Image (spheres, rainbow, N blue to C red):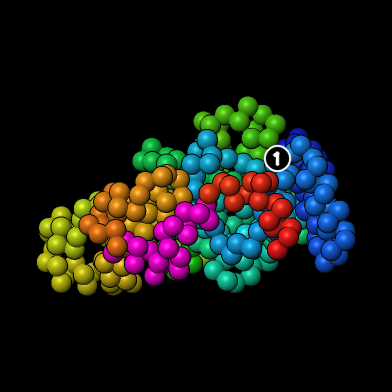
Amino acid sequence: MIYTPPPDTFSYLEPLDDMEQLGKKYWEVKDNKEELDKLFDYVKSSNNTALQRAFVGMMQEVDFMTLFDDFYQDEITVWKHPRFMECLLHDHNFFEMVYVLKGKAGNIINGQLYKMSEADICIIAPGVQHKLEVVDDSILINVIIKKSLFDESFFKRLSQDKGIVKFIKQNYYMPSMDKRGFLMFHALHNNMLRSALALLFSEAFNGQNNPNTKASLLTVILEYLAENEDETHEAENCEFSEKILRYIQENYQSTSLSDAARHFNYSEPHLSKLIKESIGVPFKTILQEVRIKEACHLFATTEYTIAQIADMIGYKSPVYLSRVFKKKMEVTPDQYRRMHKEKMYLFEGLDVIKNR
């Protein structure tokens, strides 16, 4: 078969947009107060709200943020990663695929730097702390994949014995239990895979952005990736761990170790031992992890009180939720909620930031 490269050269992604120009200028003058003030006045006088928010985002002293898929309308969202922008350390409740279309990038995952170059692919699981460094004209494509896409019908299209399928299933139910939380691929010499990726990007950027088309193309891409698993760091998994994690994810509001033992027809000590051996942590730790992740989502995206959220996730006491939340997240529920309010990025906070 003769490989024919896709017709889309993605040249329309190369010019710097307004935010990227702002980011480039900011890095040039950030240590020069006079020039930084001029840039501040320029942004303030503009009518570009997105630009103003981006500037506030660069100036904010925030160490970490959790992103939620509520922000995205489609189950698969493709977008160009902004250049000359300092990416905030974050995690998210969706899967993310990062592809280096041109150039290079630094990918910091769980505190370790992984250097990526052209045609490298990284699939990052929910709940994994990471940040991207793109400080030049390199072009990276982010593919946001909601967990809701991975239903039973989607998995039926994939080879079930492949590590990438196990990776998705493991991290679907309990992200933080995966020891690595990501897969890395090197696709520079895989023309068919790069062609499938190009078709997905073209559909999103220059086509109809059809959800069914994107899902079909993603299936093809995952199959190509599965054929190259010798180039990945495969996630450990087993059938039992998938079953118990799925059970906890689906019943976290009311379940307990004794309930799980009855469900799986084991004694409590035996089930506890199996969980510790297959997953590496006790049942209580897994249950607490799931509950706190859901609490994070509710604090960030709703106005429910601590008492209401405690009841919704299975804790009888709001005081207990506050104590467990503070220990796990290192901030109180109220602090976490304030961190995730949109007003944090609004232009109205710009004067305060300038005068700090």
Q: What crowding class fits label 1: few (fewer than 14 Cα within 10 Å), some (14-19), or many (20 or more)?
A: few
Residue 119, percent from left and from top: 69, 54
Q: Is residue 38 above or below residue 285?
A: above
Highlighted magenta segment, given as a residue range: 320-340
Image quarter (top left, top right, bottom left or bottom right) of the N terminus: top right
Q: Quadrant of residue 25?
A: bottom right
Q: Is residue 45 above or below residue 287?
A: above
User: Any magenta on residue 330?
Assistant: yes
Q: Is residue 283 left or right of residue 99?
A: left
Q: Is residue 196 above or below residue 32?
A: above
Give the residue at x 77% y 59%.
135
Nearest to the observer: residue 335 or residue 104 = 335
- Identify the secondary structure beneath mark 1: helix
Can you see residue 20? yes
Q: Is residue 156 left or right of residue 120?
A: left
Residue 281, percent from left and from top: 32, 71
Callout 1 amino acid: Thr
Q: Is residue 113 above or below residue 95?
A: below
Give the residue at x 60% y 62%.
62
